[in-house]
Amino acid sequence: MTKTPLTLSLLIAATFGAALPALAEGELNLYSSRHYDTDEKLYSDFTEATGITINRIEGKGDELITRIEAEGANSPADVLLTVDTSRLERAKNAGILQSIDSDVLEEKVPSNLQDSDNQWFGFSQRARIIFYDKNAVENPPQTYAALADPTYKGQVCIRSSTNTYNQTLLASIIENDGEEAATAWAQGVVDNMARAPQGGDTDQLRGIVSGECAIAVGNTYYFARAMAQDVDGVSADIDKIGWVFPDQEGNGAHVNLSGGGVAANAPNKENAVKFLEYLVSDSAQKYFAGGNDEFPVVEGVETTSAVQSLGEFKADDVDLSAVAKKLPKALEIFNQVGWE
């Protein structure tokens, strides 16, 4: 049966507990660093349910933050979507987001995955975990701390200190274990590097396949993508790579976010809040997380088969808003230990 806009609106409303009016008038100006095929369905369902037209401006996260900041009070931006806690916090510190009140978001998004001032919210998660060469590493590290163990000297490949995922990981270690422990960890990882930091997370996986690295650190979705698609230099030899969700007997594996918030000068604030609330509906969560092989933030929502094959794990429930405040110190430590 073909769903009418009203029927679809009621279905979405029932999913996340808020009444979206059918065929509301207006538009939404979305600044997004997302670029996945499933996003088309994500946006069209919202428009069909509400009548709100989405105007998209796409680009890299840092570029969009700079653009909104430069546009100032006249910015047409209603919503910013970007990746990683560090960028969300950067947007907040730049003054381009605003606090909002939403019972739906408070209920659906775990408290540790949202800003303490309600300026940004996480909508999907990716775990930053340890990968290893199953043929070369008999006892892979089971914790982040173990990556600094001299046992693994000359074996570790990891991205540069300018990478936002590494910045947030180190900031989480500062929040959990303190500055002294975080500094010792960063120094130990530098001492254990197989090569100078280079490339993206996929390049760390390629390093394992090529034999340049025995151990690597990366986000889960890069590996899940290589399982589901043909990723050059990884997929053909993916059986060579094992993985570990670190700290399962401790804090749990570190997760970072894709998320967003309402722009400080949003001309369509009501529509912007509706859109963020829509993103925590079950249907939207499947598109949002599944489009990049990530984990949903809403409990009980299934993700892709590739992600499911990674298995269940304990995630670190540290408050990412508190972690974000440690980012400046993380950068200081990276510089201090010479992490390129």
Image (cartoon, rainbow, N blue to C red):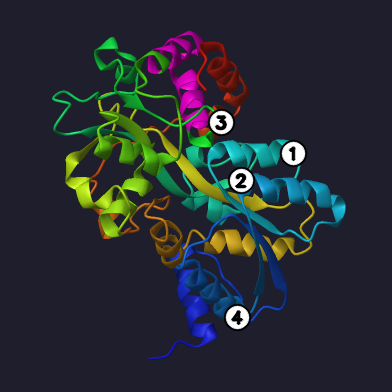
Q: Are marks 4 and 3 in contact (CB under 8 Å)?
A: no
First to last magenta residue range: 166-189
Q: Is residue 99 visible?
A: no
Q: Label 3 belongs to which residue?
A: 162
Amino acid type at circle 4 is Ala
Instruction: Identify the residue at image location x=46%, y=65%.
Output: 284
What kind of secondary structure does the magenta stretch mostly adopt? helix
Instruction: Identify the residue at image location x=33%, y=35%.
Output: 129
The quadrant the N terminus occupies is: bottom left
Local packing at callout 2 (Cα closer than 10 Å; few below 14, some 14-19, many 20+) is many
Residue 253 x/y as whole percent: 34, 33
Amino acid type at circle 1 is Ala
Q: Are marks 4 and 1 in contact (CB under 8 Å)?
A: no
168 magenta-colored: yes
Q: Label 1 belongs to which residue?
A: 94
Amino acid type at circle 3 is Thr
Nearer mark to the viewer, of 4 and 1: 1
Q: Label 2 belongs to which residue?
A: 120
| 207 up-or-down from 149: above or below | below
| 270 up-or-down from 314: above or below | below
Instruction: Determine the CA span between mark 4 and mark 2.
Output: 26 Å
Q: Nearer the viewer, residue 204 or 59?
A: 204
Label 2 residue SS = loop
For this orientation, the residue located farthest to the bottom is: 1
